[in-house]
Image: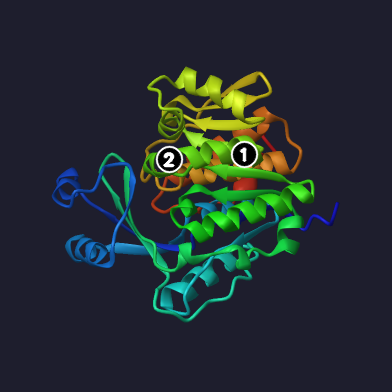
């Protein structure tokens, strides 16, 4: 086995988030499905941006957020993603490197700009994402760095990337390299609509190459086309060796080789913005697994990170997660 420079390396969309507040009527007026991510074209995101109130620009992207969380726990993380040589690309690269994550992907000149997601937060803290993919999903197998994949204990794949064939090829190449090096491969299902688009391929990938599955309740019941979480959990247990299934206020359920562990949520005074909750849960859980913690501790780290990120606007932690976990007696 080669050296382990990284606890986790992620492959995902490199996106800059544009976050603003709105009411439910705004979502209805723009046909935006509340609580979900939808893919939009350039005219649609322009119309949304023109109609929304004040906004904040923060680097995002699901797997990128997770790697920032891993770094905040004190882990060594790396990220592979595609940005254009433009203003948003420079913002993304600066922010992720400043957070301590290795990011060696080169910015490219081309017709497509850096991806962005307009995130609308309603008064209840729910987030609705409108994503213009831009260049991020143009990643292909030629951009997967075999040395970096082999040097990571866990390779983390972002389900959102499945929307382009070349990105699927990059995933499959990363899985092959990781398996050849004896590494673990983790997958996040990302979004219920994403599952609807790729259900068959996701199930095939999970059965053939995924060691760790992360999903929320909506995603996992969608994957197995059932309304019953317990049925979905049973089928998950049959398809992968380890899964962490988040259930919002009900906490999370960790399933591994016939064992089931229930993890409570870490309480927060008020949910300000649920953007990034699943990403940061993944950060804590994967950091825990990569550093040899037991499943219950890994789940608690996930809950702590998720609670921190929903207590403020934005999908990346504002507090040092390692210090937070130590104060709570988990690290």
Q: Residues within 10 Å of mark 2 (few under 14, many from 20)?
A: many
- Residue 68 spot, x, y in % from top left: 57, 56
Quadrant of res 77: bottom right
Q: In terms of depth relative to the viewer, which is nearer, 199 or 147?
A: 199
Q: Which residue is mark 1?
A: 285
Answer with left or right where residue 31 lies relative to residue 207.
left
Viewer-proximal residue, 196 or 243?
A: 196
285 lies left or right of 89: right
> Where is residue 221 drawn, in percent x and y?
43, 28
Relative to residue 265, is residue 231 depicted above or below? Answer: above
Residue at horizontal 22 percent and vertical 51 percent from the top:
22
Q: How is the image coloured?
A: rainbow
1 left or right of 241 in image: right
- Give the percent coordinates (x, y) of residue 23: 19, 46
Residue underneath mark 2: 195
The quarter holding residue 144 reads: bottom right
Q: In which image quadrant can residue 191 be found?
A: top left
Report the quarter where the C terminus lies: top right
Q: CA distance from mark 1 to mark 2?
A: 22 Å
User: Where 325 sits versus 259, above or below?
Assistant: below
Q: Secondary structure at mark 1?
A: helix
Residues packed near mark 1 inside 10 Å, few (<14), some (14 to 19) or many (20 plus): many
**Residue 123, placed above or below residue 10:** above
Q: Residue at x 37, y 46 (%)?
A: 273
Could you say which disc has been placed on residue 117 in the image?
none
Comes first in the chain, label 1 or label 2: 2
The percent position of residue 19, horizontal first and vertical second, equals 33, 58
Q: Nearer the viewer, residue 308 or 199?
A: 199
Point out the frontmost of discs 1 and 2: 2
Residue 73 visible in the displayed image: no
Residue 121 can be seen, yes or no: yes
């Amino acid at each position: 086995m080669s050296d382990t420079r990284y606890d986790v390396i992620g492959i995902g969309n490199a996106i800059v988030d544009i976050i603003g507040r709105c009411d439910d009527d705004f979502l209805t007026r723009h046909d935006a499905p509340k609580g979900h991510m939808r893919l939009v074209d350039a005219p649609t995101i322009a119309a949304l941006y023109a109609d929304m109130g004040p906004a904040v620009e923060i680097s995002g992207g699901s797997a990128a957020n997770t790697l920032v969380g891993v770094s905040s726990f004190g882990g060594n993380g790396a990220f592979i993603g595609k940005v254009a040589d433009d203003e948003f690309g420079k913002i993304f690269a600066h922010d992720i490197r400043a957070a301590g994550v290795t990011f060696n992907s080169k910015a490219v000149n081309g017709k497509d700009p850096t991806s962005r997601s307009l995130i609308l937060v309603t008064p209840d803290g729910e987030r609705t994402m409108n994503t213009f993919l831009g260049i991020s999903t143009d990643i292909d197998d030629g951009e997967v760095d075999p040395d970096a994949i082999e040097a990571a204990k866990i390779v983390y794949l972002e389900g959102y990337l499945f929307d382009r064939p070349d990105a699927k090829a990059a995933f499959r190449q990363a899985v092959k390299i990781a398996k050849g090096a004896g590494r673990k491969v983790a997958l996040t299902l990302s979004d219920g609509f994403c599952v609807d688009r790729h259900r068959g391929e996701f199930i095939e990938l999970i059965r053939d190459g995924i060691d760790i599955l992360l999903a929320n309740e909506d995603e996992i019941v969608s994957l197995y086309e059932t309304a019953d979480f317990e049925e979905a959990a049973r089928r998950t247990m049959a398809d992968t060796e380890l899964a962490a299934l988040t259930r919002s206020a009900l906490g999370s359920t960790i399933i591994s080789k016939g064992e089931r562990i229930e993890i409570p949520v870490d309480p927060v005074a008020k949910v300000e913005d649920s953007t990034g909750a699943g990403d940061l849960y993944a950060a804590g859980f994967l950091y825990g697994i990569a550093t040899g913690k037991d499943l219950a501790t890994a789940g608690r780290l996930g809950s702590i990170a998720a609670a921190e990120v929903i207590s403020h606007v934005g999908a990346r932690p504002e507090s040092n997660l390692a210090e937070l976990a130590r104060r709570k007696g988990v690290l």
